[in-house]
């Protein structure tokens, strides 16, 4: 399995609502759409149609919502200590990264003298996750602001960072 795109909808609950208010929303959604996952006040769906249906219900309940694009990570992903700054894990043990905060890339060797192990060692301080892909490949996630740094470190070790 590889990274899958999902849509997160972060809800801001109105002040003074009773604890059962959230349960009412979830019940109303059950009749309209399929939630893929949820975590606290984040609802997660798979399609734009599901997103539209959720937004319609949340408008009826006057709940403000902020949408986020998310990356659902496969179970065999390794995460670093930086993970909690860029993503979250739900009660269903699904791990997500906020797509607007991370960049995804692979590391390719571009010369016979390439040193990918050393490149990864130096990149370690900015890596958020390492995601196994089909075959023996790896897809890496890092802070989006480090694109240029990643490319320079890769080049210094005879490698090329290919951003997704």
Image (spheres, rainbow, N blue to C red):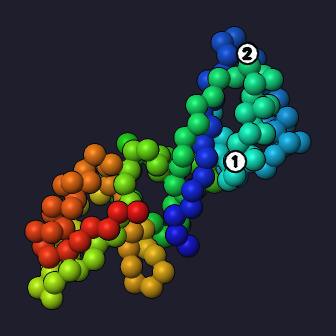
Q: Nearer the viewer, residue 57 or 96?
A: 57
Q: Nearer the viewer, mark 2 or mark 1?
A: 1
Q: Indicate the secondary structure of the residue bearing disc 1.
A: helix
Q: Which residue is mark 2?
A: 17
How would you rate the neighbour count of disc 1 (Cα within 10 Å): few for under 14, some for 14-19, many for 20 or more? Answer: few
Q: Nearer the viewer, residue 30 or 81?
A: 30
Q: Give the side of residue 152 with respect to residue 3, left or right.
A: left
Q: Is residue 31 above or below residue 103?
A: above
Q: Give the side of residue 132 with respect to residue 14, left or right.
A: left
Task: Name the disc covering residue 48, or none.
Answer: 1
Residue depicted at x 47% and y 46%: 98
The answer to which image quadrant residue 20 occupies is: top right
Residue depicted at x 32% and y 68%: 162
Q: Give the side of residue 84 with respect to residue 152, left or right.
A: right
How would you rate the neighbour count of disc 2 (Cα within 10 Å): few for under 14, some for 14-19, many for 20 or more? Answer: few
Q: Position of residue 140 (x, y in %)?
A: 36, 64
Residue depicted at x 39% and y 44%: 101
Q: Position of residue 40 (x, y in %)?
A: 62, 36
Q: Position of residue 31 (x, y in %)?
A: 89, 42
Q: Is residue 15 above or below residue 9?
A: above
Q: Residue furthest bottom?
A: 112
Return the disc, 2 or 1, that comes first in the chain's sequence: 2
Residue depicted at x 52% and y 64%: 3
Q: Nearer the viewer, residue 110 or 64?
A: 110
Task: Name the disc covering residue 100, or none.
Answer: none
* Res 84 visible: no
* Res 85 visible: yes
The answer to which image quadrant residue 63 occupies is: top right
Q: Indicate the secondary structure of the residue bearing disc 2.
A: loop
């Amino acid at each position: 399995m590889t990274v899958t795109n999902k849509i997160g909808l972060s809800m801001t609950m109105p002040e003074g609502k009773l604890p059962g208010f959230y349960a009412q929303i979830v019940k109303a959604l059950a009749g309209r759409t399929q939630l893929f996952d949820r975590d606290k006040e984040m609802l997660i769906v798979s399609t734009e149609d599901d997103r539209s249906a959720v937004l319609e219900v949340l408008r009826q309940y006057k709940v403000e919502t902020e949408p986020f694009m998310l990356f659902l990570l496969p179970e065999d992903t390794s995460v670093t200590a930086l993970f909690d700054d860029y993503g979250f894990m739900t009660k269903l043990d699904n791990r997500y990264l906020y797509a607007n905060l991370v960049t995804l890339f692979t590391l390719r060797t571009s010369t016979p003298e390439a040193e990918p192990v050393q490149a990864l060692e130096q990149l370690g301080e900015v890596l958020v996750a390492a995601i196994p892909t089909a075959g023996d490949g790896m897809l890496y996630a890092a802070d989006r602001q480090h694109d240029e740094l990643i490319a320079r470190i890769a080049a210094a070790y005879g490698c090329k960072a290919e951003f997704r």
